[in-house]
Image (spheres, grey):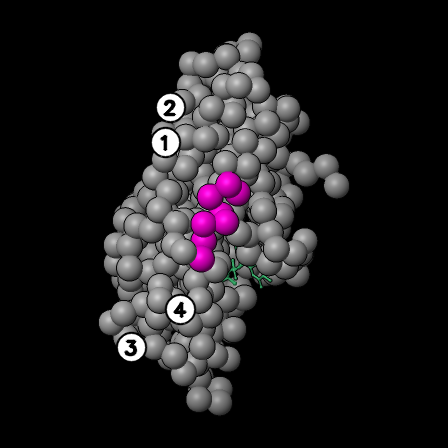
Amino acid sequence: MSDVQGHIMYTFATSVQDAIAATGEFRAGGTDLQERLRSRNANGSLIDIFGVEGLDDITYADDGVTIGAMTTLSTVGDHQQLQRDYPALTLPAQTLATPQTRHVATMGGVLCQRTRCAYYRHPELGCPKKGNADVCPSRQGDHHLGVVFDIGPCVYPHPSSIGCALLTYDATVQINGAQTLSVADLFGSGKDARSDHTLKPGQMITAIQLPVATQHERASYVRQMSRAWAEWPLVEVVVRLIMDNNTIKDAKVGIGGVANIPLRLTEVEQALIGTEASEESLSRAAKVATERCTPLPGTEYKVPMVVAGVLEALEQALANESGGQLEL
Ligand SMILES: Cc1cc2nc3c(=O)[nH]c(=O)nc-3n(C[C@H](O)[C@H](O)[C@H](O)COP(=O)(O)OP(=O)(O)OC[C@H]3O[C@@H](n4cnc5c(N)ncnc54)[C@H](O)[C@@H]3O)c2cc1C
Ligand code: SF4
């Protein structure tokens, strides 16, 4: 069903088929999209997928768990079985943004949200990501919230905390109810300034799939922020550790706020795996986190934050045997 409200053309989809056949931008919880409509960064054709049935289930199977794309962040964060099995996912789902936002924001939307760069969000300014400029104005201008891993033309950090967490699980997304794509491929290489993900128009995430849970994983999520609430982190780190007594049997480390895509710090993981957990080994591994850092003049301050954030997250994960329930 379509309707024109003001100058906005809405299609209210009730099935995945309706949604992918329509023209426009998907609207899930709307927490990112509504703000972009206000700043004229959405073109006014919307496909409302709120009424699409069957996209908000959490289903366990022999090969892992499937989370419907319309499942809200608060549902994921509060889910006790997920807290036990996938704590590195439920911790950020309980923490990011505000309770109000988490109540309506969806798993599909948190992965596909657009950059928070002020140049991009400004209705009058040009930017390669918007497609109305060739050169990034932030690189030469104000980039104090920008990247420290300068891997592509866009120098604003990717906003998705859940993207970081899902990378540490080698999760995949299901597109249009069929084809699957790794979360790493969803974000791409960061070399293309034109988008924040690699989906094409008409491609809708219908579910997120995580592999079978690892028993007794220890997880943590650390956000370093300029204010306590309702802000995107300057640096955020997700850690998953599997221990064999005091030996680190496996380690996964995701980092956000530092590159134009969420990143895995595989060099830190390699520095940890097989070592005895100690103050020295964790500190040594945390320092490795900056090996690939290429800060901009205005983001050098984030380099020590990367080391501190990784170290704090490793220490918290090691101490945390209680799973993915925040102790408030
Ligand atoms: C104060 C504040 C602080 C925040 N802090 C954080 C933070 O620390 N970390 C973080 O990750 N986020 C943060 N957010 C952002 C928030 O998580 C996102 O706005 C939200 O997750 C978007 O989800 P949504 O369902 O509302 O998406 P919508 O606003 O509906 O959509 C966002 C985008 O995703 C696309 N989309 C939505 N669903 C699908 C789908 N199924 N398939 C394909 N495309 C889709 C839409 O077309 C649109 O382009 C913050 C938000 C606020 C307001
Ligand atoms: S290309 Fe990226 S960093 Fe540059 S202005 Fe656009 S969104 Fe901002």
Please say whether residue 140 is one of the residues in the magenta stretch. no
Badge 3 marks a residue whose secondary structure is loop
Crowd class of label 1 (few under 14; some 14 to 19; many from 20; radius 10 Å): some
Is the CB of the residue bearing disc 4 within 8 angstroms of ligand 2?
A: no
Residue 76, horizontal then vertical, whole percent: 57, 45
Q: Residue at x 65, y 56 (%)?
A: 227
Q: Earlier in the sequence, mark 4 or mark 2?
A: 4
Front disc: 4 or 3: 4
**Quadrant hosting residue 111:** bottom left
Q: CA distance from mark 4 to mark 2?
A: 36 Å
Residue stretch rendered in magenta on the structure: 298-305
Q: Residue at x 51, y 41 (%)?
A: 304
Q: Residue at x 42, y 19 (%)?
A: 273
Q: Amino acid at mark 1?
A: Thr
Q: Amino acid at mark 4?
A: Gly
Q: Is residue 215 above or below residue 59?
A: above
Residue with the mark numbered 1: 266
Crowd class of label 4 (few under 14; some 14 to 19; many from 20; radius 10 Å): few
Q: Amino acid at mark 3?
A: Asn
Q: Is residue 16 above or below residue 300?
A: below
